[in-house]
Image (cartoon, helix red, strand yellow):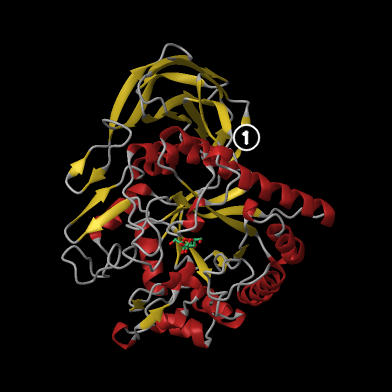
Amino acid sequence: MKAHIIIDGTKIIGKKRPVFFGSFIEHVHQCLYPGIFDPCSDLADENGFRKDVLEEIKKLKPGTIRWPGGNFSSWYHWKDGIGPKNQRQTKISYADDIIREESNLFGTDDYIKLCNQTRTEPYITVNAGDGTAKEAAEWVEYCNYNGNTYYADLRKQNGNVQPFGVKYWEIGNETYGDWQIGTKNAIEYSKTVIEFSKAMKRIDPTIKVIAVGMGKHDPDWDRIILNNAWDYIDGISVHIYIGRHEYFDSFGQILTIADHLRKIEDDIIKIAEQKQSKKNISIALSEWGIWYRRGHKDDLDEVYNLKDALVFAGAMNLMLKFCRTLEFTHQSMLVNCLGLIRTKADGIVKQTIYYPFLLFANHTGDIVLAPDVWSEGFSCKDYRYFPWPTFDVGKDNYQIDESKVPQMHNIPYLDVSATFNSATDELCIIAVNRNTEEAIETSIDVRGYQCENKASLLVVDGPDVYAINDFGKDNIHMQQFEEKLETQNLKWCFPAHSITALKIKTKRV
Ligand code: AHR
Ligand code: AHR
């Protein structure tokens, strides 16, 4: 099979923010305890963090790590998690209909330590379930205030003289859902957001406040929130989970993400016009991931195969196209639950999706380009207009009438993104070959940049699309290559079912 790519330096989509590819940790199942924090482990450092996990987070370089939830945040009271550890109380966690005991041994100071050690930005979801605006404002005071007030002093007593400077604050989690503590309708929630934002920004006017959005899940929610709370928010979020067992249909589902993001973009533009406002409200994809096997009642311990990694990479390629409005993308979650990494007492395994995350977070530039790609395509089912499948994972009555699912055609086998790194003058291309049998011989034409004569490539591949990585069994791995470039043209054969990050150094002209 053959394909052709033209990269033109003048075809710029926009600028990607440095925090664009982030992740998410939540106090559920094995994600935080013991996946990240396990003071009793032989592998823990002096702070109780798993050293092997920390090393991987540093390599993965998430821009931000959202915390403490998820559903967990709608119940979480931050004051339970500060101060001397031997005085912290174990409480019941109401997140997700499962009774779980929360030791509170990992709290705000531990989270900031984790962010500092892994060089990521904090992003906190406050409790808009059974929490109050005052409690959220006190959290901002504890984290960011530099005076001599009760909560600022408490932070100092707890060993942190300098304020943490937490910039990003999301007001609640999926507040629309009946699975949530403190479910609200859009009108109620917009009032909540206004009150929270007012109080929190009074303490620190430089913080960015993100409201809970819904995208296509509800046609009205985002409009109501944007309309009512416009002056009080800086961003609006959405959560999207995708994934299916069937190979080709899984790729069709990536377009769900585009549908949701486009819908929110449209709403933002319309409300800005109505209000004649120049304010830039951004979008936070504050949870996204591949989730179709295990429900909340299980352990969320999805073991991903190579197909899932190819879908994951395609989703990230697509997200780049939304860089003008999309500010955060939080892959859900970092460890164990739907995770990039799985842990057991004496070791870790890098899941298949670890690799695309690594490639995108490390090998994409700040300028997002629009490459032209000619590639043959495949047909698949279009599940976009059915409800979010994971809404009903594990529910007996969840059924799709397969006969009503339309088909889509000409979905390209070769899926490509291109970015330029203005700090290193490198052109970065990420290509996913979704053909299960054939390599794709591709010619890549570069215009508008003067290329050096060498390209470096990282290729992620495995024996077949259903191969997984497990403890002691690394089927999916990454190989490095160097290739010569003839003037402005590179020929490269993308192996069947693979993800490739290709970097070309360019000369300043
Ligand atoms: O565990 C993942 C859960 O899924 C999060 O708590 C919730 O926000 C999402 O719907
Ligand atoms: O129902 C939607 C999601 O599914 C919730 O966020 C999650 O907690 C549940 O399992």
At label 1, which amino acid type do we have?
A: Ile
Residue at the spot 64% in from the left edge and 70% down from the top edge:
205
Residue 243, image x, y percentages: 45, 45
- The spot of residue 327 in percent (x, y) is 57, 50
Please say if 253 is above or below 105. Answer: above
Q: Which residue is mark 1?
A: 13
Quadrant of image for the N terminus: top left
| Image: 345 above or below 372 | below
Q: Residue at x 67, y 69 (%)?
A: 185
View extreme (top): residue = 486
Quarter of the image with the C terminus is top right
Q: Is residue 15 left or right of residue 392?
A: right
Residue 303 at x, y percent in the picture: 31, 49
Q: Is residue 493 above or below residue 236?
A: above
Closest to the observer, 286 or 21: 286
Q: Residue at x 43, y 26 (%)?
A: 505
Residue 476, relative to residue 42: is it above or below? above
Who is closer to the viewer here, 49 or 461?
Answer: 461
In the displayed structure image, the side of residue 411 where residue 98 appears, left or right? left
| Res. 364 in view | no
- Look at the image and tell me whether residue 456 can be seen: yes
The answer to which image quadrant residue 440 occupies is top left
Q: Where in the figure is residue 467, as x and y percent of width and height?
A: 28, 37
User: How many discs mark residues in the rendered view?
Assistant: 1
The answer to whether residue 44 is left or right of residue 258 is left
For label 1, the SS is strand
Q: Quadrant of residue 473?
A: top left
**Disc 1: residue Cβ within 8 A of ligand 1's nearest atom:** no
* Neighbours of disc 1 within 10 Å: few (<14), some (14-19), many (20+): some
